[in-house]
Structure formats: C-alpha cells, structure tokens
Image (cartoon, rainbow, N blue to C red):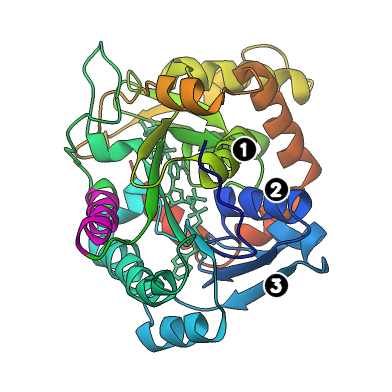
Amino acid sequence: MEKNIPKSILITGGAGFIGSHVVRRFVAQYSNYKIVNLDALTYAGNLENLKDVQNTANYSFVKGDITDTDFINDLFSRNKFDGVIHLAAESHVDRSISDPLSFVRTNVLGTVNLLNASLELAKNNPNFLFYHISTDEVYGSLGEKGLFKENTPYNPNSPYSASKASSDHFVRAYGETYKLPYIISNCSNNYGPNQFPEKLIPLFIHNIIQNKPLPVYGDGNYTRDWLYVKDHAEAIDLVFHQGKKGETYNIGGFNEWKNIDLTRLLCRLMDKKLNRAEGTSEKLITFVKDRPGHDLRYAIDASKINKELGWEPSVTFEEGLEQTIDWYFENKDWLGHVTSGDYLEYYKKQYQE
Ligand code: NAD
Ligand code: TYD
C-alpha cells in the first residue's frame, strides 16, 4: 500500500467541529510532525475546542482567511508543507440558503487559493498531498432505496452542497490539469463534541436543556446517515496516510435515522439524563415550515474504505449519542460562549414559524 509520511501538515478549519478532532488526533499520534492549524475563527471556529493541545510542541495556530490570496501565498512560501488537509468551510445548509455568496467565497474561492499555493510546493515535493474533506451532500438526494457510491453522479441541491461540489471539481481538475496529487473524501452527517448548536443534534440537546421548542422541519421524515466525529477523524487519518492519490473515498456510519425518530431517541436519552419524567422532552417537538429544497435521504456505501483501508465506525449510535450528550452537559461554559454573539439574532429568524 502507498504510504505517505509527511513532516509538516497544514490543517485548515482546525478550530471548527471536525477539524478540532482531526488536529487533536494528529497532534497526539504524530509527535514527529509539525501541525499548523489555519482558521479564520468565524462564528463556527473556537480555540476553546483545542485548549488541551494549544501548548503542545508539534502544534501551532495561525489565524487567517483562506479567501485572502496574498496571505495564503505568503503562508505557503514561508512553510514548506508536505500535505494539506482542507476542512475550512462554511458548513450549514440553512445559512447557505440565506447567504449563498459567502459559501462561494470560502468554499470555492478559498479552496482554489489553497490549490494554487499547493502547486508550487508539489513541484518540489513528489510526496505532497492535497486532501480535500467533503460531504455526501454533493450527490444530491436519494429516494427510499439505494446508497451513495464513489461513482454516483454529482447532483447538489442546496447552495452549500453546490459550493462543496464545485470545490471537489476544482480539486479533481487540478489533479488532471496540473497533476496536483490529491485525495477527496465525502462523508455523511457527523455528530459529537464541539459541534456548533445550529446543526440538528447539538441544537436539540441545547434546546432540551433550555426547555425550548425542537423545530422539526416538515414532517420529520427525512433521513440522514450519522457518524461519530472521532470515527471520521480516524478515517481521515487513514485516508491521508494510506489512501490512493487521485481517488475518492466515501465515509459513512451505516447508521440511517429519520429525523423524527432520532429526535424522539434524543428526547428519551435527555429525559433520563435530566431526571425528567419520560415524555417530557418530546412535548418540545414542534413541526415547522420545511427547509426549501430539503434533500429526502442521504446514505453512504462505505464499503470501499472498509475493504481497502480496513476502516469501520468504532462506536454504536447509542454510545456516540450518550458520549455527545455527556460532553454538552460537562461543557455548559462552552455552550454559553458559542451561543453569545450573533447566535440569538440568527435563531430569532429561524424560530419565526
Ligand atoms: P464547522 O463549520 O464546524 O467549521 C468550519 C471551520 O472553518 C471553522 O473553524 C471556521 O472558523 C473555519 N473557516 C470558515 N471560513 C473560513 C475561512 N474563510 N478561512 C479560514 N477558516 C475558515 O464545519 P465542520 O462541520 O467541522 O466541517 C468541516 C469540513 O467537513 C467542511 O469542509 C464540511 O463541508 C465537511 N463535512 C462536514 C460534515 C458535517 O456533518 N459537519 C460532514 C461531511 C463533511
Ligand atoms: P443539519 O444538522 O442541518 O445537517 P444537513 O442539513 O447538512 O443534513 O440537518 C440534519 C437534518 O435535520 C436535515 O434533514 C434538516 C433537519 N433539521 C430539522 O428538522 N430542524 C433543525 O432545526 C435543523 C437544524 C435540521
């Protein structure tokens, strides 16, 4: 199997949800690497996510915006990265519906800036790798049956998925046109510690704690395939080190849930955790207006990464959810900090139904 053993790695978006788990994993596993975390610290990025690694010798943080071409070129000329793991992005579908341009800026232009800067490094380093982290949402929506495979045609439906699809295409195009060594992985919905409480699971945990309504879009019969974030970080580690250049890997949890069933499970677990009578949290469920262009179902066929790299999820959904709930209980300060600022403003708009 092809092995890539780099020394200096740039991780973009490392202060965000998935990025912070990837940074923590790499800092802990590879003491001989130099890990540079580049993040603009938007509303979704928070250095509190990395408190435990901030003073580690093989780790450093750079605040900066991937859309700033001069800044990126300068950073790359001063650091001879052997690899880039690119996670920085605008990541929330609902925000992409109200502000598509910022998704084009960060997800498309930002990615192209990184690709351009990477070309120079790849010229002088045959082991260079640009590893692009993407989503299964680029494939569009499944009906009741079927799974997304690596060769499923792209058919994005939201501004978010359209911007991620575009960035995936640019990565592939740089591979074809300029021979930039790359890998792309497309993953299903992640959940776990450090996720900003605007996505379904952390938002509903937050609202149950606060006794606020749980806004289920439409009839709740939409399906997502959920993966614990630490299992995604492990998959990223494997793909980065052992994946085949020029290939795509689909990563998923083999774990499909309808939103309404997941919400009810979460309510039951939270009632126990909060010593509330069974059924208390379910009363918070409120069906609200559907998301425009709402994709019915996502589900990943992860057999390629399973067969080729031996990866599979390590925790069951019940275990992962319990660990996630425990984390939010133990980190109420974190929740308080990230929900200050523009959070309330944003959610006033969301809860108008
Ligand atoms: P996130 O929103 O939690 O974090 C994104 C990070 O990127 C933040 O730290 C933010 O500050 C940073 N960032 C945003 N714009 C930037 C810019 N212009 N310059 C530099 N940094 C910037 O996102 P996430 O959920 O951790 O997702 C990370 C990546 O994984 C994204 O590329 C996303 O598309 C992909 N992904 C996410 C999921 C999921 O379920 N969350 C699933 C599959 C793939
Ligand atoms: P989300 O966590 O935003 O991830 P994505 O849209 O990228 O899949 O949403 C997961 C599912 O939950 C999706 O079908 C939309 C739905 N949803 C709600 O019903 N209510 C909510 O408040 C949110 C944020 C999402």
Does 176 lie within the magenta span? yes
Residue under label 3, please give it: 60
Q: Is residue 55 above or below residue 347?
A: below
Q: Is residue 194 above or below residue 174?
A: above
Secondary structure of the residue carrying tag 2 is helix
Q: Nearer the viewer, residue 77 or 225?
A: 77
Residue sitting at x 47%, y 14%? 261
Q: Nearer the viewer, residue 67 or 99?
A: 67
First in sequence: mark 3 vs mark 1? 3
Question: Looking at the picture, which amino acid does disc 1 mark?
Answer: Glu
Q: Position of residue 347 (x, y in %)?
A: 45, 52
Question: Looking at the picture, which amino acid does disc 3 mark?
Answer: Ser
Does any portion of residue 196 appear in the rendered image?
no
Q: CA distance from mark 3 to mark 1?
A: 21 Å
Q: Position of residue 226 (x, y in %)?
A: 49, 26
Secondary structure of the residue carrying tag 1 is helix
Q: Answer yes or no: do the residues labelled 1 and 2 have beta carbons within 8 Å?
A: yes
Q: Quadrant of residue 287?
A: top left
Question: Looking at the picture, which amino acid does disc 2 mark?
Answer: Arg
The mark found on residue 234 in the picture is: 1
- Which SS type dominates the magenta stretch? helix
Q: Position of residue 322 (x, y in %)?
A: 71, 24
